[in-house]
Image (cartoon, coloured by chain):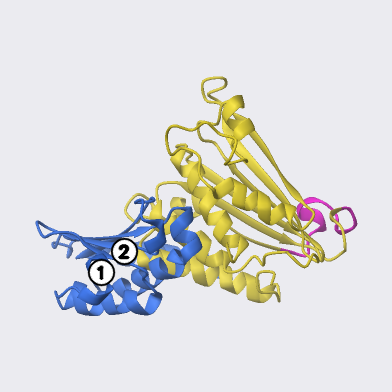
Chain colours: A yellow, B blue
Amino acid sequence: MKELSLNILDIAQNSITAEADLVEITLDETDTTLKLSIKDNGYGMSPEFLASVADPFSTTRTTRKVGMGIPLLKLAAEQTGGGITLRSTQRSADPENCGTEITAFFHKDHLDFTPLGDIVSTICTLLQGFPDVDYLFTHRISSGETPEEAGEGAEGAEHVIGIDTREMRVILGDDVPLNDPMVLLWVRDSLEEQYAEAGSKPSA
Amino acid sequence: MKSLEELAKIRERMQNKVVLREGQANIRVAVGMATCGIAAGARPVLNALVEEVAKRNLNDKVTVTQTGCIGMCRFEPIVEVFEGDKERVTYIKVTPEKAREIVEKHLIGGTPIAEYTIGAAEK
């Protein structure tokens, strides 16, 4: 993948396949690091599946359930000296709190860091293709070298860019889908404005 | 920042429009958006299609959808056009430029662009 935002698009689709109705995409960025989290409330993965999902070559798949999506994200993170973690709870084990969270950590100053790229297009593409799912996108940008120095969470962040489709839906009601062209354009403009105000294009 | 009030206006406008919408979408355009498609550049192709369809007011006639891997990863990005009873048209190695041309000549003009189809590649 040429951009991390393409990995994000790819992985978020797994959440939708897992019947999630809320997908949370969070980016925590400092001067030198990037933490990505994609969290859903879908039906989750079994412990066996979870153990094998990051390695496409060790699976004994008989169906096309495992793809290259997670291995590619893992590669992108590891080649910067970072890595990924996976957590998942199956719906059968806990229907109230099921879901999957993938976290990836990147060192931005590493030569092999893949730029984030056009994250706005990724968000718009998700809304366009799967308008019945809700998305919470948050991109926190902090100055400082490390997550500790920059301060964890929203308090330490200098800029918070984001969109919550649940808020949008309250206003749009049932008549206007998230993938209406006017709505998509609004989302694109809104995010681009927020990035412009933050004085940073998505990390390059 | 873009205000949520603008969204409310979009809704109002849409509600007024709903009545006018008689025509049914009878053309479906599907873009392969699995890992293979995305890696090959399907996202800008999809965005070009969505934009062009909106710009030319084809939303009542054309639906743009995303689909999974169709098993011909080497030909990605793939765009398929389904129209009524007609045979499906499969475009391969599509770029945003080709996508706009497909909207112009095929979706509006009614004539598939043979040279971009899988048929042309397999000759």
Q: Position of residue B39 (x, y in %)?
A: 50, 61
**Label 1 chain ID:** B
Closer to the camera: disc 2 or disc 1? 1
Numbered tag placed on residue A64 in the rendering: none
Chain of residue at mark 2: B
Residue A201 lies in quadrant = bottom right
Residue A127 location (% of width, % of height): 44, 56
Q: Quadrant of the N terminus of chain A?
A: bottom right
Residue A174 shown left or right of residue A16 in the figure: left
Residue A36: x and y in percent read 68, 52
Q: Is residue A123 above or below residue A42?
A: below
For the view shown, which residue lies furthest in the left direction? Answer: B85
Tell me if I can see residue B4 in this picture. no
Q: Residue at x 88, y 53 (%)?
A: A148
In this view, the residue farthest toward the front is B123
Query: Does A58 sit left or right of A79 as displayed?
Result: left
Report the front residue among B56 and A166: B56
Please give the residue where the numbered disc 1 appears in the rendered image: B117
Q: What is the crowding at mark 2: few (fewer than 14 residues within 10 Å), some, or many (at least 20)?
A: many
Q: Secondary structure at mark 2?
A: strand
Query: Do tag 2 and tag 1 residues touch (Cβ < 8 Å)?
Result: no
Tell which of B67 and A16 is nearer to you.
Answer: B67
Disc sitting over residue B79 in the figure: 2
Amino acid type of the residue tagged 1 in the rendering: Thr
In the figure, residue A128 lies in which quadrant? Answer: bottom left
Please report the bounds of the magenta region as a residue range: A148-159
Q: Is residue A19 left or right of residue A154?
A: left
